[in-house]
Amino acid sequence: LALSEEQSIDPIHAAALSLLSRIYFEMDNCKRAKAVMKAAMPAIIQHGHTFFQGEAWLTLAKCCLSEAKDCLLDEKEGKQSGGEVSVQMRHLKRALVELQHSADAFEKIQDVKRLREVYYLKAQVCHSLPRHFSQRNLAAQRFREMNSRVAKSIRPVWVDVLVQVVQNNE
């Protein structure tokens, strides 16, 4: 991070900030993760590789989902009033937009594993939002497609070796 700042290498600096944001998110510091990612987004979108763009949108979506979960927990514990439902819905809708941006980026580079995660989250978010059932079904269908692609790409190497050994011994 310091080296990229020193050398004025914006794309590398933005990618480093993106990684830092994901680390903050994993450490359950969602507000800081979102702030760091929003600061890095202009450079990521302008100069970053499509993979980093998709990762950035996915991280922002996960932050929104975490904030929506926090709103729901606060409401269940009685800390907040019923107005939190609209705040929660706003976070879910924002997450849906960011998941779509992420899906668009990962589609460009055909990252099946990331697309599988994005479509799973998108299906879950659409299920939580009223009147989004057709989007939910489409996202679930795309998740199943990505899941089958991942399953087909995994070759059972050890099974093939064992089958050859057994066949040779017969």
Image (cartoon, rainbow, N blue to C red):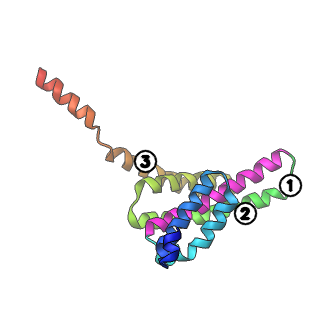
Type of residue at label 3?
Asn
Residue 87 or residue 22, whichever sits in front: 22
Find disc 2 in the rendering and name its residue: 90
Is 168 displayed left or right of 128 in the figure? Answer: left
State which quadrant residue 41 falls in.
Answer: bottom right
Residue 134 in the image: x percent, y percent?
58, 57
Q: Residue at x 84, y 59 (%)?
A: 83
Residue that numbered label 1 is attached to: 82
Q: What kind of element bears circle 2?
A: helix
Asked whether 6 or 130 is in front, the reply is: 6
**Magenta segment, principal secondary structure?**
helix
Residues at discs 1 and 3 in contact (Cβ within 8 Å): no
Instruction: Give the SS element for disc 1.
Output: loop
- Is 105 above or below relative to 169? below
Which residue matches tag 3? Answer: 147
The residue at the point 47 percent across, 52 percent down is 116
Please state if 63 lies on the left or on the right of 154 as rendered. right
The answer to whether the residues at label 2 and label 3 have Cβ atoms under 8 Å apart is no
What's the magenta region? Answer: 50-77
Left or right: 155, with 130 as reference point: left
- Does 126 sit above or below residue 168? below
Neighbor class of circle 3 (other Cα within 10 Å; few <14, some 14-19, many 20+) is some
